[in-house]
Image (cartoon, rainbow, N blue to C red):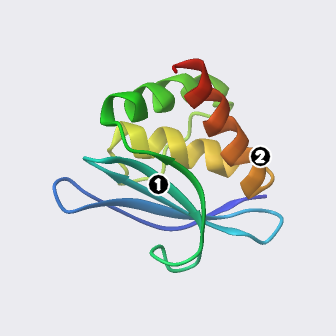
């Protein structure tokens, strides 16, 4: 089972989460005014980039589209950013980092 390790959700300051997959991978999900960045990394700034969307409008649409995949609506306590919620809950439900990245890329291609 995947685990939410930690997150930062302070409007105007930080919006990120870390999810450990059942395969032992650590995902770093970052949300900013400039878009979405997902890395395979314990530290966020370092690591392999799995997904990036730099258009904020498209980033929001990607989050909306993948929210349809959410099976369990339990939202981590204290998390308020709707894009961060959608991406984090999806990451918690994907068995591997590649499965999560594929889900994001599929949504991205649908809106191109």
Query: Looking at the picture, does residue 7 appear above or below residue 72?
Result: below
Q: Looking at the rendering, which quadrant does residue 3 occupy?
A: bottom right
Q: Which mark is residue 4?
A: none
Q: Looking at the rendering, which quadrant does residue 8 occupy?
A: bottom left
Q: Is residue 40 left or right of residue 85?
A: right
Residue 56, x across and y down, in percent: 32, 36
Q: Is residue 21 left or right of residue 64?
A: right
Residue 58, x across and y down, in percent: 40, 29
Q: Secondary structure at mark 2?
A: helix
- Residue sitting at x 48%, y 32%: 63
Residue 44, x across and y down, in percent: 48, 73
| Quadrant that contains the N terminus | bottom right
Q: Residues within 10 Å of mark 2 (few under 14, many from 20)?
A: few
Residue 2, x across and y down, in percent: 72, 59
Query: Looking at the picture, does residue 57 appear above or below residue 55?
Result: above
Q: CA distance from mark 2 to mark 1?
A: 16 Å
First in sequence: mark 2 or mark 1?
A: 1
Q: Is residue 46 left or right of residue 40?
A: left
Of residue 46 and residue 42, the one placed in the foreground of this image is: 46
Of residue 21 and residue 47, the one placed in the foreground of this image is: 47
Q: List the single residue furthest toward the left.
A: 12
- Residue sitting at x 66%, y 27%: 69
Residue under numbered circle 1: 37
Instruction: Please name which of the two marks, 2 or 1, marks the residue nearer to the observer.
Output: 1
- Residue sitting at x 54%, y 23%: 65
Residue under numbered circle 2: 99
Q: Is residue 45 left or right of residue 65?
A: left
- Residue sitting at x 64%, y 49%: 91
Q: Looking at the rendering, which quadrant does residue 61 occupy?
A: top left
């Amino acid at each position: 089972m995947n685990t939410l390790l930690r997150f930062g959700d302070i409007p105007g300051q930080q919006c990120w989460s870390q999810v450990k997959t059942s395969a032992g991978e650590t995902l770093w999900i970052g949300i900013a005014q400039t878009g979405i960045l997902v890395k395979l990394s314990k530290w966020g700034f370092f690591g392999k980039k799995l997904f990036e969307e730099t258009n904020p409008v498209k980033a929001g649409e990607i989050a909306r589209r993948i929210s349809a995949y959410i099976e369990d609506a339990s939202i981590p306590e204290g998390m308020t950013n709707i894009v961060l919620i959608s991406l984090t809950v999806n990451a918690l439900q994907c068995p591997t980092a590649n499965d999560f990245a594929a889900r994001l890329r599929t949504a991205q291609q649908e809106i191109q």
